[in-house]
Image (tube, helix red, strand yellow):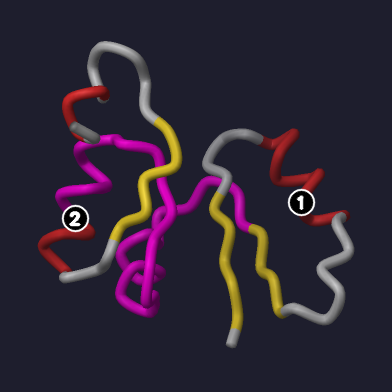
Amino acid sequence: LGRLVVCGKNEYLRAKLARQNWNGVAMHVQGFTKRMSDYMGASDLIVTKAGPGTIAEATIRGLPCLLSAYLPGQEKGNVD
């Protein structure tokens, strides 16, 4: 059982999580990637903010989404 964290272009977060001690949990920390489709295909669940593109792609794949946040205004309707 492994976990993947994709931080996008947030290099500060990627570096911080990569240094973290995960106490034996297999954790892979990734920055920006063009392989999101591959990662979603290999996943059982996605934890993401309420961006419509990510929600749509996960829904098409039948991948359950756990929405962790949203941008006020443009993404709020995606969590209602």
Q: Which residue is mark 1?
A: 17
The image position of residue 20, as x and y in percent, is 85, 57
Q: Which residue is mark 2?
A: 57
Nearest the camera: 78 or 53? 78
Residue 28: in magenta span: no
The image position of residue 21, as x and y in percent, is 88, 64
Per the image, label 2 sits on a secondary structure element best described as helix
- With respect to residue 61, does 5 lie above or below? above
Quarter of the image containing the N terminus?
A: bottom right
Residue at 71% over, 39% down: 13
Nearest the camera: 4 or 75? 75
Lateral position of residue 41 relative to residue 55, left or right = right
Residue 39: in magenta span: yes
- With respect to residue 69, does 73 lie above or below? above
Kind of residue at disc 2: Glu
Kind of residue at disc 1: Leu
Of all residues shown, which one is farthest toward the front? 80
Category of crowding for the residue at label 1, using alpha-carbon neighbours closer than 10 angstroms: few (below 14), some (14–19), many (at least 20) = some
State the extent of the magenta-drawn residues as a range.
30-57
